[in-house]
Image (tube, grey):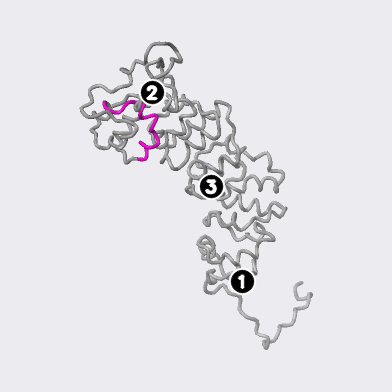
Amino acid sequence: MALEGLYHPHSLPFTLPGAVIGAGWGGEGTQGTHPLCLAQFLPSGCQTQPITASTIEDILTLSPEQLELCLSSAVLVEKLEDVLDLPLTTGMLQILKKKVDEFFPSGIPEEQLPRLGSLSRRFSEQEISRWPVTSRATLSSLLSPSGGQWDDGQVQQLLSRFLALGGSWSGALLQEMGGTVLCQLREEQIHTAGQLDISSCSQSKKEQLYGKAREAFASLGSSPSSYFCRIRPYLGGAPAEDLKDLADAGVAINMDLGTFLALNPQELVLDVKHLLGENLPELKGAEHEPSVQSWLHKQFQQELDCELGIGLQGGRPEPAGTANPPLTLLSPIPALLPLSHLS
């Protein structure tokens, strides 16, 4: 078996740590004239043929013990993406993580972090706290859903590390990450987040995010229009009293239908007329949306007709005995008593 096919330095996308590349590789040494000592890279104790770049799928036939002995860290790092595409067990992932750590004893370089894929989820919060996550591209790649689910603590550590190294949020970055990552935002992160979509968050998480956003944008309270523009992405977690305050702000905010449909139906009040403003007629077209139906079923039909007047159907009938009796035009109208009668 030709060693050049296994560990030739020019075939690897990185520099072998501690290696002295010499004339033994078919050329003049770049760091000296001594041949490369292969002992530290060749597996020992392997009972089968060592795994090479061309036989990487054979790791699926190995026991955990033989995987550790027959797969070198150099071959693993070279073929990392191909390895992570294989159906790996939890035990195998732990061994692979150990080998990656061994290959980068001084820490994983930033350019290698996006290559970790699903393996990145095997690192502890403490280990993540040492990662050199300085670019938005690295952060976005690590948080990609394609790598699997992160624990909340891991996400917080990753976000904190990015900020600690001088990173900053942008609406585009957070929108790109999307999903559950948005549900992990803290107040200081929300302040610069821009227009986001938190529709994938649970209702309790929406309420938490709304509370943070409300604090973050409190200084805009004297300008209802500006406040609404910033708080709008988080209104899915707003309580009824805050929605009423928006409706009673004295300034038409003209909430768009998409934002209205994202509100918690449990918190909606009848005064949607002032929330939607000029967009109120669009509500008729969304009459059969589940959230609108849920809200309609809690309103009295007569109030819908009188207050909104856009033809919404599905409200509750008036309770028996509360309807105003019709006027009987043929009944005599009693004469008014003279004022002297009251004296």
The tag earlier along the polypeptide, 3 or 2, is 2
- Residue 281's place in the image compared with 162, above or below, is below
Q: Most extreme residue toward the bottom, as rendered?
A: 330
Dot 1 lies on which element? loop
Q: Is residue 24 above or below residue 120?
A: above
| Residue 126 placement, left or right of 166 | left
Q: Residue at x 52, y 46 (%)?
A: 206
Mark 2 element type: helix
Residue for badge 3? 198
Name the quadrant of the N terminus: top left
Q: Are marks 1 and 3 in contact (CB under 8 Å)?
A: no
**Residue 13 falls inside the magenta stretch:** no
- Magenta run includes residue 79: yes
Image location (x, y in percent) of residue 162: 53, 30
Range of magenta residues: 69-85
The span from disc 3 to disc 2 (Cα, nearest Å) is 39 Å
- The amino acid type found where label 2 is placed reads Phe
The residue pinned by badge 2 equals: 103
**Residue farthest to the top, as pictured:** 33
